[in-house]
């Protein structure tokens, strides 16, 4: 009965996401399916961690939206491609019950989103050459954006512990911080190289980064962090 209630909550959440304009219809539907899969396999507490990423992403995407629009960086409505590229790895980690990979992937997605949305408020440098670039340039990094990414990653790790997704606080923090930021910087490197050259698009970069974040999380816990 409780699980049924949680499944209904997933449907309601998907409807709310669509009505608020955070995702298009297909993206909202896929988020609902992802939520149901996680609830059935791992429980509602694992889903809350993923929902936290979606919430933070939505809030910080709208942060200073007028300024972002003026400089041509305001995001349009996200689609199912965004959901898949950021969400498929956490879902697979949840299916296998691997909390380290789960946290690492979501911490990466959260760190990257917050770094991108806050980092555009200052002038970045290209991660591969350190030359100044315009805000929003693929592969651009900044101190402000990096700080925002760290906060986002740590938020995921601490939340995962208090929701009993991770059994211990210290490993949860290590995983979220190290895996999240490694994945985030990997995203920037891929953006500065493969995306700028046209070999990757944004979804390819996001998917690759979450895979890297998940793998780093798994490695951290396997060596006894």
Image (spheres, grey):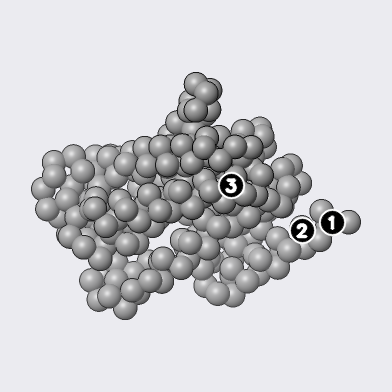
Q: Quadrant of the N terminus?
A: bottom right
Residue 164 in which image quadrant = top right
Of all residues, the one furthest to the top in this rendering is 223
- Residue 54 percent coordinates (x, y): 53, 59
Evaluate if marks 1 and 2 touch, with contact meaning CB atoms under 8 Å apart. Answer: yes
Q: Is residue 150 above or below residue 128?
A: below
Q: Residue at x 13, y 41 (%)?
A: 129
Helix, strand or loop for disc 2:
helix
Q: Is residue 92 visible?
A: no
Tell us which disc is closer to us: 2 or 3.
3
Q: Earlier in the sequence, mark 1 or mark 3?
A: 1
Q: Which mark is residue 6?
A: 2
Q: Separation of disc 2 and disc 3 at Cα? A: 18 Å
Helix, strand or loop for disc 3:
helix
Q: Residue at x 32, y 53 (%)?
A: 147
Q: Which mark is residue 92?
A: none
Q: Separation of disc 1 and disc 2 at Cα? A: 6 Å
Label 3 neighbour load within 10 Å: few <14, some 14-19, many 20+: many
Number of marks present in the image shown: 3
Q: Separation of disc 1 and disc 3 at Cα? A: 21 Å
Q: Is residue 28 visible?
A: yes
Taking 43 as reference, is 195 left or right?
Answer: left
**Would you name the residue on which mark 3 appears?**
160
Tell us which disc is closer to us: 1 or 3.
3
Helix, strand or loop for disc 1:
helix
- Residue 195 percent coordinates (x, y): 29, 44
Q: Which mark is residue 2?
A: 1
């Amino acid at each position: 009965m409780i699980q049924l209630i949680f499944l209904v909550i997933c449907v309601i959440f998907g409807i709310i996401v669509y009505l608020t304009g955070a995702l298009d219809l297909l993206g909202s539907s896929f988020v609902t399916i992802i939520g149901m899969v996680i609830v059935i396999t791992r429980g509602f507490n694992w889903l809350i961690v993923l929902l936290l990423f979606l919430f933070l992403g939505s809030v910080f995407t709208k942060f200073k939206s007028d300024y972002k629009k003026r400089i041509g960086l305001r995001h349009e409505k996200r689609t199912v491609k965004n959901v898949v590229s950021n969400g498929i790895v956490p879902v697979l980690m949840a299916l296998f019950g691997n909390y380290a990979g789960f946290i690492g992937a979501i911490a990466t997605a959260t760190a990257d989103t917050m770094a991108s949305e806050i980092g555009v408020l200052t002038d970045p440098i290209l991660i591969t050459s350190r030359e100044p670039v315009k805000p929003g340039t693929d592969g651009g990094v900044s101190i402000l954006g990096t700080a925002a990414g760290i906060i986002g990653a740590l938020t995921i790790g601490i939340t995962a512990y208090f929701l009993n997704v991770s059994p211990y606080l210290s490993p949860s923090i290590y995983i979220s911080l190290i895996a999240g930021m490694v994945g985030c910087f990997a995203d920037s490197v891929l953006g500065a190289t493969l995306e700028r050259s046209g070999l990757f698009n944004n979804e390819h970069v996001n998917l690759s980064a979450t895979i890297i974040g998940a793998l780093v999380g798994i490695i951290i816990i396997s060596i006894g962090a």
